[in-house]
Image (spheres, coloured by chain):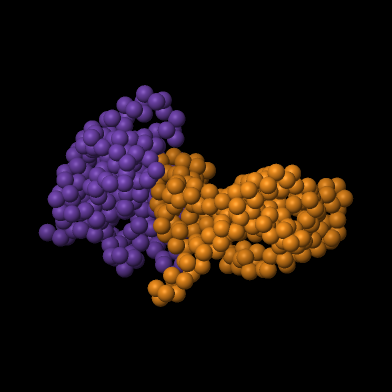
Chain colours: A purple, B orange
Amino acid sequence: MIECKKVAFEQGSFKLSGIDFKIGEGEYAVLMGQTGSGKTTLLEAICGLRPIKSGSILLDGQEISNLKPAEREIGYVPQDGALFSTMNVAQNLGFGLKIRKWSKTQQVERVKELADLLGITHLVHRKIEGLSGGERQRVALGRALSFYPRIICLDEPLSALDDKTKEDMYQLLLKLKLELNITALHISHSKSEAIKLGDKILVIDEGVLKVEASDSIWL
Amino acid sequence: MGIIGGTFIFLIIAMVLADLTFTTPDDIFSVLQQKEIRYAIKLSMITSTITMFLSLLVSIPIGYVMARYNFFGKRLLDAVLDIPIVLPPLVIGLSLLILFQTAPGRFIESHFRITYTVYSIVIAQFMVACVFAVRTMYVTFSQINVRQEQVALSLGCNKGQAFRYVVLPQATNGILTAASLAWARALGEFGPILIFSGATRMRTEVLPTTVFLEMSVGNIEAAVAVSLIMIMAGFAVLVVLRYFGTEPSLKTIL
């Protein structure tokens, strides 16, 4: 469960304040808002990549606002995937485990499990160069899930994909939601995406964050 | 455009060819027989290599900080880094000499002699070569997407680990470019060395000094032969560099 209490941040002339919301255990929240409304900034603040000015962020009731990103146990999937270009797919998937000093056998097992879960078993020895957009996002997703994070943050993971790939990714995300019961915060521009995936929809509009029920406003 | 460009390329090649046709293999062999020149070759190789490693040691952190952080005085620092590039080489040598005549400089000299020793050669080379390495590393790190580092942090890395495992492997090409630039620059350095280190045979004579000394006594064959040795060394570095492959974007900037 993640909770933001009166969170505010400032970046140059950009300001956002009074952010209050809660995403329950196993809840899939979609965050919407216009370009430049501060969605990515909020996501980065939750991941610990950007300081907040005031307020507090709680993860399972524990204050994490001052923790380093590494200590937060939050999975992060940035917009372009940002795969490690000098590593192959398996090394990308296992990186978080290597850093956590898992044993070699545990790493191999977990990577296999992830590849299987995401349908990328045939890709594990491939280089990142030459992967398609959809394949990249699957690897990025697997890498973020590898260490059993308490919540996963996705920044427009589907925006650069073609319709067919997008549909496949919806199915995959829905499957993960059901099978792993993941708690997620997912940034999106697409209403249909929000309706398909979201249990809860958060909208940043003119500097104010509002919480909507997933089936209320756009139907 | 074509003619202007063509003339330039022609001049580069003609220049090297002229050197080649001017000397014979015998000239080069006889030059290699002289122990002064063998000493100069050895000293040049050793000092250039030390300068190269020192430059990397300094340019990697500076380049990274400049590329990743905004801080007070960054533009000033950026301008200061250009000073060794715009200063005339002789002035750098003279300035170094003067620096070691100041009170702190004299204090160092009284414990550890620097001017007119081989150490001064490395310092003179380093002052110029390092800046080129810094510029290269700055561009290299600027081109590496910061997102990958951020993901590494979220996956459990501290900043050092993110740098070591994610940034550094991507900077390999840039590091190679910086190293070879610094090395080539150091090998060709003459003005500052002449003033700061002198031109004593068997002591502070590096290859450019040899060319100068041989020319000044009218021994043009030897001067050209030594020049050819330097051209070959420089060429070898270029080949190694191209072989390992540099990102095209970086090549154009340099």
x, y percentage for residue B36? Answer: 75, 47
Farthest residue to the top: give it: A105
Residue placed at 39% from the left, 73% from the top? B2
Using the image, determine if residue B7 lies above or below residue B131: below
Farthest residue to the right: give it: B110
Q: How many marks?
A: 0
Residue in front for this viewpoint, A138 or A219: A138
Residue placed at 47% from the left, 66% from the top? B9
Tell me which corner region of the image, top left, top right, bottom left or bottom right, holds residue B77: bottom right
Tell me which corner region of the image, top left, top right, bottom left or bottom right, holds residue A145: top left
Q: Is residue A136 left or right of residue B249?
A: left
Residue placed at 72% from the left, 58% from the top? B219
Q: Is residue A1 visible?
A: no
Residue placed at 62% from the left, 63% from the top? B81
Q: Is residue A183 left or right of residue B206?
A: left
Residue in front for this viewpoint, B81 or A152: B81
x, y percentage for residue A217? Answer: 17, 60
Q: Is residue B184 left or right of residue B217?
A: left
x, y percentage for residue B169? Answer: 46, 44
x, y percentage for residue B14? Answer: 52, 64
Residue in front for this viewpoint, A117 or B204: B204
Q: Is residue A112 visible?
A: yes
Query: Is the N terminus of chain B in the top left, top right, bottom left or bottom right quadrant?
Result: bottom left
Using the image, determine if residue B67 lies above or below residue A114: below
Residue in front for this viewpoint, A143 or A212: A143
